[in-house]
């Protein structure tokens, strides 16, 4: 028997969302564990028969409460009830469905050895002698098992705790069952550049954030052999391991102190959200998940256009020269990005006036020449020469370590400190954890980092989430935007997040990836896994971040990555941008932070000081033959803006994913899609749908000019529309799908197929 992914979800952050995901054993190493949310799909009506159950077994207390449609929130604690104030990514009350604003109030108390059942819509939670199970209620009144806590005569208890005798912290393990053929999707983004999996079965996931690794404790299951699927979210912000194995196994992490408040250090609140949907209806799971964690506000229109970024523009005149060239070449431009080191000292959070004498005038001139907005990158690191260092240090707004002076870093030989985004006074992203360079003589490990909310081990997953929240709040205030606004007037870009991060005007990119052909395709599996974790506002570095040198013979071959990935971004990513480092020509879509007129916000992004040449990275920098192709794709991007805008509107209203793995739409209509997804076959996993009507199959093989593309058999709704697959470029019809086709793929024709009428797509009809 296997352990269910939904358990895993509960581990990570106080946000137990909608997900009913199965997982294996994991350790919950912090004291106020905030819980799991599990959910199952159904109609919008979600009748409940109870306000909740409390089960008490001596030292352990378990709370099960309806939360959202067809969903439950589960919390566990030791020695005393949870406080109800644990850090959580959950919205309380949820956007849709029952529950919320009830604290720990329940109407049913179950003693040790007792049993009870509670229903919320189509989901049933059952306690039988202390063992927790989840069922889907079928239309005929029968129950179908989703997952149950794993029990065996010779096994550890399914809920297993270890107390740390030196402190009031403890760790915990939870074990659930899973079916042999069950698939699990999501878990956020795993590190670049070798993980090409969509089905995460058989993996061990380290819930630790660093550059390009953004694990999110959200799972979806296909629940093979039943008439439903389900998802699960772990609402825990401590470090942990998640095992999704074919055999019973356990994952452990070091004991951690989760909070710095003694009053809650003995409370473990395990919140999970368990949800289920008809098989193949992953959109229903996403709707319920985002109902309890928040939905992505629609981005400003200009974000859907072309953004120009570079590592880096060194002064104001370089930016104006680039804007003038865009004007002269008649290339559409939505945003121009000023990346790192525009400041004098790290932590000044202002332009170096000797190089940028009048930023407001610069922004106005860029707007006049191109119509583009501007964005700037600022880091949450502060060097001791900055005008802000003393204030931050004196107020305790810099992260520290357990046994050292602070979380330190060395960048260009400069002594720096990390701003503590978890402190309300200094909320300023992710810190570099267990990585990066250290100032010589102060080699403090990041695992010993200490934040306002607790240690890195206990609460570090919350750092980027609180960072996003702080930026979002600041920009809401500066723009007089209502807190509950569903549209963004601005945006920021982050390379790290946590469950629920999608509810901010903040978007994630995949970090500093390598410029290789295999990485180009690996980023597809990363993107669809993020989407399955509730995040559809995701993008990547066009062509990768490092390793692309067009001056070398190999680099000229590798340049194909740039062209083809630019093609992908035109039709694939929610946002489109180019950023390159001069001599080494790194091509990157780093959006970073938007400067809207005079608004300046910062986000963390660690890069390298490079050369000051400016001619590389603009669309005209890659040769006369390629320049027209790039211009053509930028123009094609603008044709798709109405379609993309409608996709974002649907994302906001229902949580419906934009970048869609093939199993989302074709797992019922095409057995090959399910089987190939199970085995992570590149034929299926290296393709995706952009919304419901466009299939993209990037070329990721050096020197290739053609490709085999699998066109899935259309589902019932698509057949009802009278649709068939049609080639984007030459309008060739390929019928109802269910077959592999071999198509030409020159640089100016990435394999793309669409359903229905192309003019209909350009008009924004999805």
Image: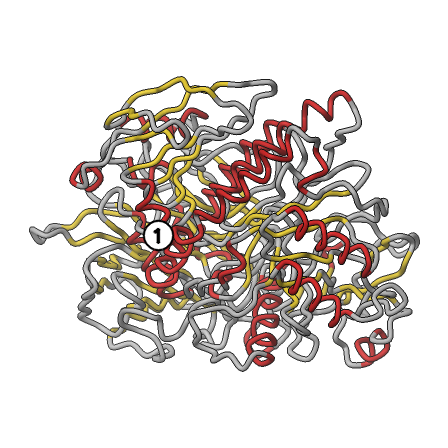
Rendering coords of residue 279 (x, y %): 24, 43
- Seen from this angle, which residue lies furthest front? 328
- In screen coordinates, is 581 left or right of 257? right
Q: Secondary structure at mark 1?
A: loop
- In screen coordinates, is 763 left or right of 513? left
Residue hosting label 1: 764
Q: Quadrant of residue 244?
A: top left
Q: How is the image coloured?
A: secondary structure
Q: Is residue 405 visible?
A: no
Rendering coords of residue 494 (x, y %): 61, 57
Compare residues 183 and 517 and report the one nearer the observer: 517
553 above or below 686?
Answer: above
Rendering coords of residue 44 (x, y %): 21, 64
581 above or below 103?
Answer: above
**Image point (23%, 36%), residue name:** 723
Rendering coords of residue 253 (x, y %): 59, 50
């Amino acid at each position: 028997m296997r352990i269910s992914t939904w358990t895993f979800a509960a581990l990570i952050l106080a946000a137990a969302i909608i997900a009913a995901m199965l997982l294996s054993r994991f350790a919950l190493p912090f004291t106020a564990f905030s819980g799991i949310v599990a959910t199952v799909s159904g109609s919008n009506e979600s009748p409940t028969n109870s306000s909740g159950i409390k089960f008490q077994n001596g030292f352990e207390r378990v709370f099960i409460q309806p939360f959202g449609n067809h969903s439950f929130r589960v919390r566990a604690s030791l020695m005393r009830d949870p406080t109800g104030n644990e850090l959580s990514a959950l919205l309380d009350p949820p956007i849709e469905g029952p529950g919320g604003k009830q604290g720990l109030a329940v109407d049913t108390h179950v003693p040790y050895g007792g049993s009870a059942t509670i229903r919320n819509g189509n989901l049933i939670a059952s306690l039988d002698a202390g063992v927790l199970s989840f069922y889907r209620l079928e239309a005929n009144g029968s129950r179908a098992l989703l997952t149950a806590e794993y029990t065996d005569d010779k096994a550890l208890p399914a809920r297993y705790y270890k107390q740390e005798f030196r402190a009031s912290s403890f760790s915990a393990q939870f074990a659930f069952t899973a079916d042999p053929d069950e698939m699990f999707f999501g878990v956020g983004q795993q590190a670049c550049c070798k993980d090409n999996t969509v089905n995460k079965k058989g993996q061990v996931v380290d819930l630790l954030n660093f550059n390009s690794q953004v694990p999110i404790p959200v799972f979806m299951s296909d629940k093979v052999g039943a008439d439903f699927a389900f998802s699960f979210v772990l609402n825990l912000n401590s470090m942990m391991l998640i095992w999704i194995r074919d055999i019973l196994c356990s994952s452990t992490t070091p004991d951690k102190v989760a909070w710095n408040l003694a009053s809650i250090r003995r409370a473990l609140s395990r919140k999970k959200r368990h949800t289920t949907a008809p098989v193949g209806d992953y959109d229903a799971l996403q709707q319920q998940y985002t109902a309890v964690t928040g939905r992505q506000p629609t981005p400003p229109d200009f974000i859907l256009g072309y953004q120009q970024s570079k590592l880096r523009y060194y002064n104001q005149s370089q930016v104006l020269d680039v804007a003038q060239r865009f004007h002269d070449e008649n290339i559409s431009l939505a945003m121009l990005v000023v990346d790192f080191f525009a400041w004098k000292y790290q932590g000044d959070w202002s332009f170096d006036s000797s190089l940028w004498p009048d930023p407001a005038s610069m922004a106005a001139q860029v707007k006049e020449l191109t119509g583009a907005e501007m964005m700037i990158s600022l880091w949450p690191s502060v060097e001791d020469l900055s005008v802000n260092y003393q204030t931050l240090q004196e107020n305790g707004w810099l992260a520290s370590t357990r046994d050292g002076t602070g979380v330190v870093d060395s960048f260009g030989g400069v002594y720096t400190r990390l701003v503590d985004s978890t402190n309300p006074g200094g909320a300023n992203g992710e810190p570099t954890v267990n990585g990066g360079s250290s100032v010589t003589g102060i080699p403090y490990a990041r695992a010993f980092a200490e934040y306002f909310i607790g240690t890195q081990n206990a609460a570090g997953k919350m750092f980027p989430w609180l960072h996003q929240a702080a930026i979002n709040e600041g920009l809401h205030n500066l723009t007089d935007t209502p807190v509950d606004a569903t549209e963004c007037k601005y945006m920021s870009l982050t390379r790290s997040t946590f469950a629920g991060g999608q509810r901010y005007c903040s978007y994630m990119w995949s970090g500093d990836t390598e410029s290789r052909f295999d990485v180009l395709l690996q980023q597809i599996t990363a993107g669809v896994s993020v989407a399955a974790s509730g995040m559809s506002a995701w993008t990547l570095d066009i062509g990768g971040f490092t390793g692309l040198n067009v001056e070398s013979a190999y680099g000229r071959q590798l340049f194909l990555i740039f062209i083809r990935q630019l093609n992908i971004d035109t039709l694939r990513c929610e946002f489109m941008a180019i950023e390159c480092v001069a001599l080494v020509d790194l091509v990157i879509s780093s959006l970073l932070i938007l400067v809207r007129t005079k608004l300046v916000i910062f986000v963390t992004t660690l890069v390298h000081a490079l050369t000051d040449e400016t001619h590389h990275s603009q669309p005209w920098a890659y040769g006369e033959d390629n320049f027209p192709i790039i211009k053509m794709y930028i123009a094609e991007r603008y044709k798709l803006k109405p379609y993309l805008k409608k996709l974002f509107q649907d994302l906001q209203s229902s949580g419906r994913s934009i970048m869609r793995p093939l199993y989302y739409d074709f797992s019922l209509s095409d057995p090959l899609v399910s089987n190939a997804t199970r085995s992570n076959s590149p034929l299926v996993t290296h393709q995706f749908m952009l919304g419901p009507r466009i299939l993209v199959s990037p070329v990721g093989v050096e020197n290739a000019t053609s490709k085999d593309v699998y066109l899935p058999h259309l589902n019932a709704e698509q057949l009802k529309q009278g649709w068939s697959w049609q080639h984007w470029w030459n309008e060739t019809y390929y019928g109802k799908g269910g077959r592999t086709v071999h198509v030409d793929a020159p640089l100016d024709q990435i394999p793309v197929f669409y359903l229905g009428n192309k003019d209909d797509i350009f008009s924004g009809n999805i």
